[in-house]
Image: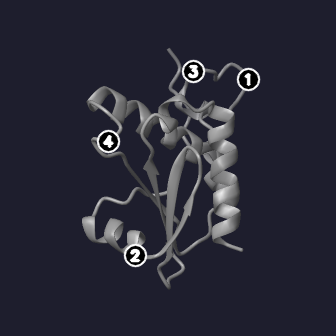
């Protein structure tokens, strides 16, 4: 079996299913993990949308944008919360590379019922509109 190409290399014909086929533009920015970062974003700008709440803050540095996801127990049991977070992550993967700004932190907060049941296209549109409003 021939060796797999480097994961960052451009895909070649027949590379479907290998690490090289991953599209770089669809990667998520670094993930927020510290409670202090989530609390700082909660004190900053927010934009409510039908499928989620977007919290955003400027960090005053030139680092890459960072993103966090949160879903409380109001959403439901662990299965429902994980489903909501997966949908938010995928929407962010589609929208953030084009609209996120360097030096910003974003937190997507899931809404009960709406995050898990809203059509995915509408969720992506909501995120795009929310980012444009935050940066306006």
Picture coordinates of residue 68, whole percent (x, y): 41, 56
Residue picked out by circle 4: 74
Q: Is mark 2 on a helix, strand or loop?
A: helix
Tell me the distance, in whole angstroms, between the alpha carbons under discs 3 and 1.
11 Å
- Mark 4 neighbour density, 10 Å: few (under 14) some (14–19) many (20 or more): few
> As drawn, is 92 to the left or to the right of 105?
right
Residue picked out by circle 3: 17
Q: In the current view of this chain or complex, which residue is farthest to the bottom?
A: 60
Which comes sooner in the sequence, label 1 or label 2?
Answer: 1
Residue picked out by circle 1: 13
Picture coordinates of residue 86, whole percent (x, y): 45, 35
Residue picked out by circle 2: 43
Which comes sooner in the sequence, label 4 or label 3?
Answer: 3
Q: Do the residues labelled 4 and 3 touch (CB within 8 Å)?
A: no
- Please say if 33 is above or below 113: below
> As drawn, is 31 to the left or to the right of 131?
left
């Amino acid at each position: 079996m021939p060796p797999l190409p480097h994961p960052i290399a451009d895909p070649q014909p027949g590379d479907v299913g290998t690490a090289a086929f991953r599209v770089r533009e669809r990667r998520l920015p670094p993930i927020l993990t510290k409670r202090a970062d989530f609390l700082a974003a909660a004190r900053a700008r927010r934009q409510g949308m039908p499928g989620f709440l977007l919290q955003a803050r400027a960090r005053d540095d030139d680092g890459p944008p960072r993103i966090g996801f949160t879903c409380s127990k109001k959403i439901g049991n662990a299965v429902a919360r994980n489903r909501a977070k997966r949908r938010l992550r995928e929407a962010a993967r589609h929208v953030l590379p084009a609209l996120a700004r360097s030096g910003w932190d974003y937190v997507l907060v899931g809404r009960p019922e709406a995050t898990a049941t809203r059509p995915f296209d509408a969720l992506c549109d909501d995120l795009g509109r929310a980012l444009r409003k935050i940066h306006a």
